[in-house]
Image (cartoon, rainbow, N blue to C red):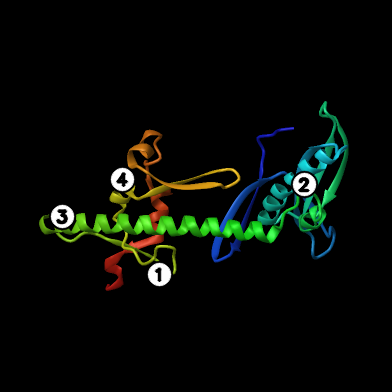
């Protein structure tokens, strides 16, 4: 077995008002409706858990099922296979579950959770991150615009760029020229303390990014080539 080989699944979905693209590693795939016109691949996630011999064992499994559900639901996983092992790690049995069935299986247990509540909480976290990043990026854009206006007095008109679509996340903001974006376009780091008791969005300074080379050929964390494709010179609007 080569554990370095991975199957990656990419999904475009929506959580609350947030449209998101999720990428994640999954364990394997299975063929569905083999030999028919509807033949396709379904994603399968493999998990292990200690054999359930007591109420405490069941509580731990119920708590783990929340993580299994969230991962599988968001990535479009069709089947979860849980292998039950003993204390020595020997596989004793296995059982398949549909992600949609997990909330029902924990209902009425000592450790129970509501899938809709957790998805709504995830949406609130994304709202917080988006609002914070938008506000901080707007502040950064304003400060840079002020500097540019001062420099234009002696250096001439600045080569601003704009988003290709005004429907983008920050489509209303003017964007710096690529050579300047490579130097200081804002990057943010999101961190949290499980179970999301404290979420932090922190501005990462250009100096920090330069320490590991992440500023080379990138505008923020986006490759410069993509930045050039996703934006256009402001003069094109009147050309």
Residue 28 in view: no
Q: Which residue is mark 2?
A: 62
| Left or right, residue 168 beside residue 73 | left
Point out the residue furthest to the bottom here. Answer: 238
Q: Gap between marks 1 and 3, in whole Å?
A: 27 Å
Residue 229 is left or right of residue 11, and the answer is: left
* Tag 1 secondary structure: loop
What residue is shown at x 48% (from left), y 55% (from top)?
A: 129
For label 3, the residue is 151
The CA span between labels 2 and 3 is 61 Å
Q: Position of residue 100 (x, y in %)?
A: 77, 58
Q: Which numbered disc, 4 or 1, marks the residue that appears first in the sequence?
A: 1
Tell me, yes or no, whether the two marked residues, 2 and 3, touch with CB atoms within 8 Å.
Answer: no
CA distance for labels 2 and 4: 48 Å
Looking at the image, do the residues carrying marks 2 and 4 touch, with CB atoms under 8 Å apart?
A: no
Q: Secondary structure at mark 4?
A: helix
């Amino acid at each position: 077995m080569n554990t370095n080989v991975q199957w990656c699944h990419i999904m475009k979905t929506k959580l609350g008002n947030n449209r998101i693209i999720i990428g994640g590693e999954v364990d394997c795939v299975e063929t569905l409706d083999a030999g028919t016109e509807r033949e396709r691949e379904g994603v399968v996630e493999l998990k292990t858990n200690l054999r359930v011999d007591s109420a405490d064992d069941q509580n731990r499994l119920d708590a783990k099922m929340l993580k299994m559900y969230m991962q599988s639901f968001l990535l479009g996983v069709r089947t979860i296979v849980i292998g039950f092992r003993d204390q020595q790690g020997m596989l004793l049995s296995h059982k398949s579950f549909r992600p949609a069935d997990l909330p029902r299986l924990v209902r009425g247990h000592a450790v129970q959770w509501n899938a809709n509540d957790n998805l709504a909480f995830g949406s609130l976290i994304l709202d917080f991150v988006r609002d914070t990043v938008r506000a901080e990026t707007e502040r950064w854009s304003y400060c840079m615009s002020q500097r540019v206006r001062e420099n234009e007095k002696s250096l001439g008109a600045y080569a601003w760029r704009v988003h290709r679509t005004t429907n983008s996340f920050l489509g209303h903001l003017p964007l710096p020229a690529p050579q300047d974006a490579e130097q200081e376009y804002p990057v943010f780091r999101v961190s949290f303390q499980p179970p999301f008791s404290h979420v932090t969005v922190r501005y990462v300074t250009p100096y920090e990014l330069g320490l590991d080379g992440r500023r080379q050929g990138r505008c923020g964390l986006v490759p410069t080539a993509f930045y050039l494709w996703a934006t256009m010179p402001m003069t094109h609007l009147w050309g």
